[in-house]
Image (spheres, rainbow, N blue to C red):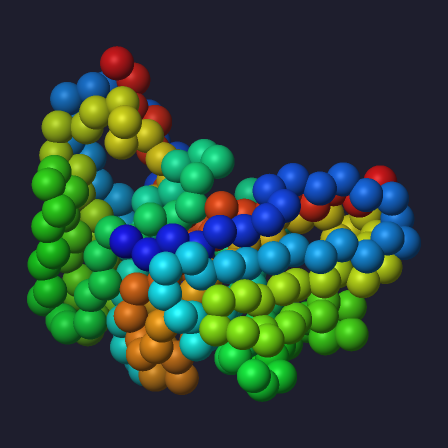
Amino acid sequence: GAVVSQHPSWVICKSGTSVKIECRSLDFQATTMFWYRQFPKQSLMLMATSNEGSKATYEQGVEKDKFLINHASLTLSTLTVTSAHPEDSSFYICSARDGGVGELFFGEGSRLTVL
Amino acid sequence: ILNVEQSPQSLHVQEGDSTNFTCSFPSSNFYALHWYRWETAKSPEALFVMTLNGDEKKKGRISATLNTKEGYSYLYIKGSQPEDSATYLCAVNNAGNMLTFGGGTRLMVKP
């Protein structure tokens, strides 16, 4: 299957720091990428959908000024957690597809710990 | 928001046992159901995508069925092996294209 690479896989930062997470599709062009968050013992929750070259669509309850998403090319989307606080500590994972409603390919996930 | 539920939350079986678990979802506005296998420290891996009522898919020892009228899907693993240990996620697309995940079933297969 197609490969999606996510980086970094683990980040620890101080409160107030901004953290950028990258999601790359390595062998296909991802017209749509999705960002999810998973708190301990909870389901994966969709945060936002990003389409290349346009603004991301955020799910209800997700602050767009807090979680900045950029999808500037067909192979790269970034999620920036601005001024991170301990309650932002979570597992963030991206997925991508090259169109339609078909198979999603996931990154490896990024575990963020904010001290 | 769709309510997608998976049961059981976790499951311990002995090597060689066959097992199954459930994903239930609202049947209205259903579009597609996905099963993923997620091993620790790896990316979730797509197993099946199913859209039609009565669909049955099979990949090796793993198979899945779909009942869209009553809103459930079963995932079966025949002759479980230790390497089958993982979290199995189901996710449902509704007609609005939103994908909602269940909480997952964590399977542990003891040698």
Is B72 positioned to the left or the right of A72 in the image? Answer: left
Give the residue drawn at x 13%, y 28%.
B79
Q: Position of residue B78 (x, y in %)?
A: 12, 34
Residue B87: percent from left, percent from top = 38, 40
Total numbered labels: 0
The answer to whether B33 is drawn above or below residue A113 in the figure is below
Q: Residue A53, how many percent across, how many down?
A: 56, 83
> Can residue A11 be seen in the rendering of this structure?
yes
Q: Residue at x 13, y 47 (%)?
A: B59
Q: Which residue is farthest top?
A: B111
Q: Residue furthest right?
A: A16
Name the residue nearer the viewer: B106 or A91: A91
Q: Residue at x 16, y 52 (%)?
A: B64
| Residue B100 in sight in this render | no
Which quadrant holds residue B13? Answer: top left
* Image position of B60 with respect to B79: above or below: below
Q: Residue at x 39, y 37 (%)?
A: B39
Which of the 4 quarters of the picture holds residue B28? bottom left
| A16 sits left or right of A32 in the view | right
The C terminus of chain A lies in quadrant: top right
Q: Is residue B12 left or right of residue B40?
A: left
The x and y percentages for residue A70 are 64, 73
